[in-house]
Amino acid sequence: MALTKISWRPTYRSSKFRNVYGKAGNREQCFDGIPITRNVHDNHFCAVNAKFLAIVTETAGGGSFLVIPVNKAGRIDPHQPKVCGHQGGVLDIKWNPFIDNIIASCSEDCSVRIWEIPEGGLRRNMSEAVLELYGHSRRVGLIEWHPTCSGILFSAGYDFKILIWNMEVGSPVKMIDCHSDVVLCMSFNTDGSLLATSCKDKHLRVIEPRSGKVLQEADCKSHRVNRVVFLGNMKRLVTTGVSRWNTRQVALWDQEDLSMPIIEEEIDGLSGLLFPFYDADTHMLYLAGKGDGNIRYYEVGTEKPYLQYLMEFRSPAPQKGLGVMPKHGLDVAACEVFRFYKLVTLRGLIEPISMIVPRRSETYQEDIYPMTAGTEPALTADEWLSGMDREPVLMSLKAGYKRPCQKAFKAPVRERKTMVMNGLLESIPPKTENELMRMFFRQHDELKRLREELVQKDVRLQQLELELNNLRNNGNKL
């Protein structure tokens, strides 16, 4: 009888990312003294790009967020200027991927607003948005910019609808109305031709965003999906959620067949939400738990075991949310492949965490920095709406980040900044006293603005009449 040989050698895959480690920033690299919001909404409350760090703050009445130049770490002045135009708490903020100074925010006041941050940061409080977009009948919990198209923004509200806004005309152009409960998460594939959503109705959907057609749908009974992310061009999805036994899980799906997951893997028994982050350049998946200080990371493959566990970054300080630096903002000289900005509410601290590939050579490491999605849009809004799809315009990180000349963002309508959705959504009466109050204050602000415009036009009219009289008098004298 032949005996089977058993190998005791550990089954490590050959991977250049096997020894990636997390490095927390020192005190001088942290942002201290920030009154981070205590809102319990399941979002990151933080957005980062190569120029600025934005953090939603705790405030009395209305909603506000800080915008700090990313290179000005240290203790933040208690009187630091804020963006404070919302009448309700700010629930999500996202930087425009193609224009560093443009940030979108959504709020409990049912609005989405577009802000233009001046070069160097804020010098005084900003309350006037470039655009105010109203279309949702209830609070807006999520916003996402299209990954390859300039000027297209998606917003998901508690009215169970996703609106698609065209910034070039300042109005909504589409509505996706296939959800029966609150949308929890939105994620795009690489070229933005597909949208994946997780919903409170326990369904995972893959949607064609222009038509709103549901291409694939999964009823997740054994794996309650909370968050979803596309795995680049691998035609796969990763979701995080909770099992029947209330343990945290991660699942891998085929985007063309959601009948059942390819694999399900239990993580631990903690109760906090698991935030997934995917790096398409390195094929690494990061899982960060809300309320704990751990960040696990895996390498994603096309063959079994599909998710190869690499290591775990541990910290005693619990995280409320995490911002992610875009690739062109990383320190390639230090072999940094990913960077988080961790919100520590109890200490009022934003702590950078760099994921680094240990290399001895000081030369540029081309194998860990392939061509990556750049800062130039591949499409205009009209091209995308007409049915075109294009892959992102790629850039190399070899020469360091050099941003090309950008066109300034222009509001489509100068005199009227408030864009209200007409035709796509019926006028739904407020359901609660809070919604009624928000609607009242919104209308009150609109009346106040119209009165001010009327006064200004009256003054201008009087000036023109005086000038006309002067011209007539001068003509009579001649």
Image (tube, helix red, strand yellow):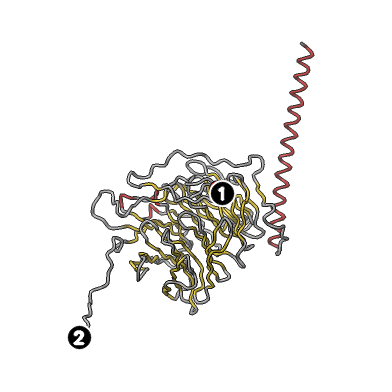
The residue lying toward the viewer, choosing from 152 and 226, is 152
Q: Is residue 438 left or right of residue 20?
A: right
The residue lying toward the viewer, choosing from 131 and 109, is 131
Local SS, label 1: loop
Q: Residue furthest right?
A: 476
The quadrant of the image that shows the C terminus is top right
In percent of width and height, residue 311 lies at: 33, 67
Amino acid type, label 1? Ser
Mark 2 Cα shell of 10 Å, populated few (<14), some (14-19), many (≥20): few
In percent of width and height, residue 14 lies at: 27, 64
The quarter holding residue 463 reads top right
Which residue is denoted by mark 1 in the rendering? 386
Above or below 295: residue 27: above
Q: Earlier in the sequence, mark 1 or mark 2?
A: 2
The quarter holding residue 92 reads bottom right
Amino acid type, label 2? Ala
Which residue is denoted by mark 2 in the rendering? 2
Local SS, label 2: loop
Q: Is residue 313 left or right of residue 67?
A: left
In percent of width and height, residue 71 lies at: 41, 47
